[in-house]
Image (cartoon, helix red, strand yellow):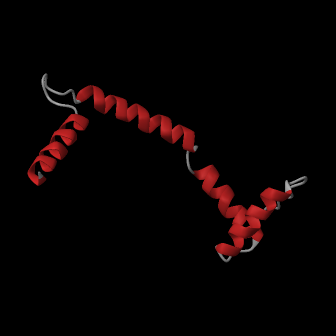
Amino acid sequence: MATLQIRNMPDDLMEKLQERAKRERRSVSAQAITELQRTLDEPHDRQKVRELLKRADELRAKTKLHPGTPEAVEMIRRDRDRDHEDWA
């Protein structure tokens, strides 16, 4: 197996790594490997968000409301108003 040495690691980053390793009951080296694997194996979070937003836009474009259909906020408001009338 290969060996990795990290020079000039910021103290706060090392503390976070040590805390996470302790919480996960791993050595600092094992936690560093886990974090690297997780980061390198998964697409970047920003990319995931972009993909989700794109899919949401595509779905929104496909699902158009019929003319005259009230918006969700309007429907909730009507329902709440009706409940308040029942209490009066």
Looking at the image, residue 69 lies above or below residue 37: above
Looking at the image, residue 67 lies above or below residue 11: above
Q: Where is residue 62 in the image (x, y as percent from the top left)?
A: 24, 28
Q: Can residue 1 be seen in this view?
A: no
Q: Residue at x 28, y 26 (%)?
A: 61
* Extreme residue in the left direction: 86
Front residue of 13 and 73: 73
- Quarter of the image for residue 21 reads bottom right
Residue 20 relative to residue 58: left or right: right
Q: In which quarter of the image is the N terminus?
A: bottom right
Front residue of 72 and 59: 72
Residue 2 relative to residue 68: left or right: right
Q: Please give the count of numbered marks on the rendered protein.
A: 0
Q: Where is residue 50 in the image (x, y as percent from the top left)?
A: 49, 34
Q: Which residue is drawn at 78% across and 57% down?
A: 13
* Extreme residue in the front direction: 88
Residue 62 relative to residue 68: left or right: right
Looking at the image, residue 24 lies above or below residue 85: below
